[in-house]
Image (cartoon, helix red, strand yellow):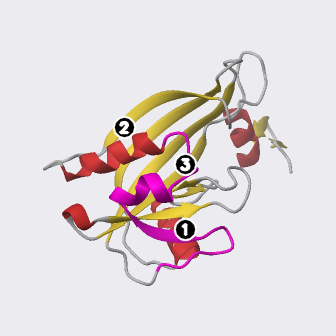
Amino acid sequence: MWYVQKSDQHYSLTPQGKEYANRMDAWDFHIQLQAKTGVLVCAVRGQCDEKEYLIYTREKHPFFGKQGFITWKVKFGESISEVAKRELWEEAHLIWEPKLVHIKHSFVYEKESKKLLEDKFFYFFLVQDPQGEAQGSEEGPVEWIARKDFSTKITSIYYDFQDIMTIIDSLSTPNRQLTFEEKSYEVEDF
């Protein structure tokens, strides 16, 4: 792969060279780390007190055994809504049209050392009454769980699960607009 090209009159950057330079810090000439981008899919079925949430238990690392909503990293060049739609199908065999409801930028620090462990943006998609029969995959099982049963059935949650539920609960507000938040977390077990 070439980063520089030569013409009759001068040298210039190739498209690959421009992208490489785009990720470089102009002052210290190092490639900069970038925040991870992902999707979070909250599938809900039922109404009012009868609502159930699709909870996923990871059977792969990182976060083996943790429970929460379906998430996935967005790869370079992928559509965020297509990733959300694809992952709901691949992880739970459900079909829906994505509705972006919230964007969250999280910083995760190790509690004792205060070292930054993770910097990520998550795009939250809400799925109301998706089509299909929920089935897990090799990535882990899924289960519809009523809110009243969370404390007994969700035993190993992600560190920000309660914050996510607060966001999901706020979705019933009339005329709710897309929201954004930034939040830091300190964790002992990452």
Residue 20: image quadrant is top right
Q: Residue 180 carries which label?
A: 2
Q: Which of 35 and 133 is in front in this view?
A: 133
| Circle 3 residues within 10 Å: few <14, some 14–19, many ≥20 | some
**How many discs mark residues in the rendered view?**
3
**Left or right: 30 as drawn, with respect to 152:** right
Q: Name the residue under label 1.
A: 87
Query: The residue tagged with tag 3: helix, strand or loop?
Result: loop
> How far is mark 2 from mark 3, CA to CA?
22 Å
As drawn, the residue found furthest toward the left would be: 174
**Residue kind at label 2, given as amino acid type:** Phe
Q: Which of 139 and 7 is in front in this view?
A: 139
> How far is mark 2 from mark 1, CA to CA?
22 Å
Mark found first going from the N terminus, 2 or 1: 1
How far across and down, in percent of the image, does residue 6 sit? 83, 42
Query: The residue tagged with tag 1: helix, strand or loop?
Result: helix
Q: Which mark is residue 157?
A: 3
Residue at 55% x, 50% y: name it: 38
